[in-house]
Image: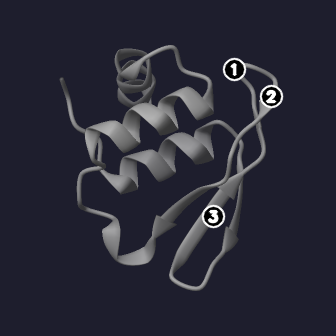
Amino acid sequence: MSSCSFRDLERVCKALGLESRPAKKGTIWSGISPLTNAPITPICIHTHAGGRNVPTGTLRKYARELGFKNLQELTEFRNRL
């Protein structure tokens, strides 16, 4: 299973066309997932987390929220960026 950094996750959110807004300690990404045409639960990414890997359970949750079927699909999308 491959890992994904918070910086990579931000790139995925940006590529999906989600909106970002500043938060107290980072950025909140929200909007409509183009993959499922459904609103996503806001995803918060802390400013100082950029280079760290997202924990696997959290990444699975974010992948489902963004409309991906599984982590492999998210990883393939990230690799195409």
- SS category of the residue bearing label 2: strand
Disc 3, SS: strand
In what element is the residue under mark 1?
loop
Circle on res. 28: 3
Residue that appears at 54% across and 27% down? 64
Q: In the rendered image, which quarter is residue 59 located in? A: top left
Q: Residue at x 78, y 46 (%)?
A: 31
In the image, residue 59 above or below residue 20:
above
**Residue 26, position as x, y percentages in the image:** 52, 75
From the viewer's perspective, is 35 left or right of 72?
right
Look at label 2 and name its amino acid.
Ala
Q: Which quadrant is the N terminus positioned in? A: top left
Q: Point out residue 36 in the picture as x, y percentages from the top left corner.
A: 74, 19
What separation in Å lies between label 1 and label 2 (alpha carbons)? 8 Å
Residue 41: x %, y % from top left: 68, 46
**Where is 27 relative to 68, above or below?**
below
C-alpha span from label 1 to label 3: 19 Å
Task: Name the disc covering residue 76, or none.
Answer: none
Quadrant of the snapshot with the C terminus:
top left
Q: What x and y, as percent, mark residue 22?
A: 66, 76
Q: Is residue 22 left or right of residue 77?
A: right
C-alpha gap between disc 3 and disc 2:
17 Å
Q: Residues within 10 Å of mark 2 (few under 14, many from 20)?
A: few
Q: Nearer the viewer, residue 17 or 35?
A: 35
On the rendered structure, is 78 left or right of 51? right
Total labels: the figure holds 3
Residue at image position (60%, 47%) is: 14
Residue kind at label 3, given as amino acid type: Ile
Give the class, few, some or many, for how many residues have Cα within 10 Å of label 1's Cα (few <14, many ≥20): few
What kind of residue is marked 1?
A: Leu
Q: Which residue is mark 2?
A: 38
Q: Which residue is mark 1?
A: 35
